[in-house]
Image (spheres, rainbow, N blue to C red):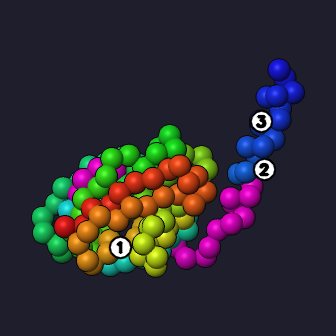
Amino acid sequence: MKRVWLFCSALCLIAALATGCNQSATTEDDATGTATATGTAAETTTEETTTTTTTTTGAPAAAEAATITIADMSFGDPITVAPGTQITVTNNDSVEHSMTSRTADTFDVHVDGGEQGTLTAPTQPGEYAFYCVYHPSMTGTLIVK
């Protein structure tokens, strides 16, 4: 039993080191929250980011921001934002996650454990499915209205 625990611990350490070495150098603004939000902002790409669950509802498109919180290997409920909204991705887990759009070249933010990153919502309304490249079973939906 002790060997199994040691083996699992070693695998987790290797996985953490491997994902830590697979970061890109682009990082932008920070923020927090997960749920439904409305607002606008400019698009950015971030490598290191932290997630906290917060629900934000705001006025029409100007300086609004929203937050997606990653916790317990989950993105939480779908989030609704206005086109161009600045979204903060907060990673409350201890491992790196990404928020990568299934629509090519739409958004791709990588956030280290305990960190935050930002992205800008697409300018075209629609539903954008996304996932974590490190943990493909982690999926979510960004709704732009």
Q: Residue at x 55, y 76 (%)?
A: 26
Q: Residues within 10 Å of mark 2 (few under 14, many from 20)?
A: few
**Amino acid beneath label 2:** Ile
The CA distance from mark 1 to mark 3 is 37 Å
Q: Residue at x 12, y 64 (%)?
A: 59
Tell me the quarter of the picture where residue 145 sits.
bottom left
Upstream in sequence: badge 2 or badge 3: 3
User: Mark 2 or mark 1, which has the lower sequence index?
Assistant: 2
Where does the image place residue 87, in percent across and percent down from the top left? 35, 65
Quarter of the figure that contains the N terminus: top right
Q: Which mark is residue 14?
A: 2
Is the residue marked by circle 3 packed among few (<14), some (14-19), or many (20+) residues within 10 Å? few
The residue depicted at 40 percent of the width and 54 percent of the height is 140
The magenta span reads: 17-37
Residue 18 horizontal side relative to residue 63, left or right: right
Separation (CA) of disc 2 from disc 1: 32 Å
> Is there any visible trace of residue 108 in the rendered image?
yes
Q: Are marks 2 and 3 in contact (CB under 8 Å)?
A: no
Counting residues from the start of the chain, the first of labels 1 and 3 encountered is 3
Foreground residue among 107 and 13 = 107
- Dot 2 falls on a residue whose secondary structure is helix
Q: Which residue is mark 1?
A: 120
Decide which of 29, 105 is in the foreground and name it.
105
According to the picture, the residue beneath numbered tag 3 turns out to be 8
Residue 8 in the image: x percent, y percent? Answer: 77, 36
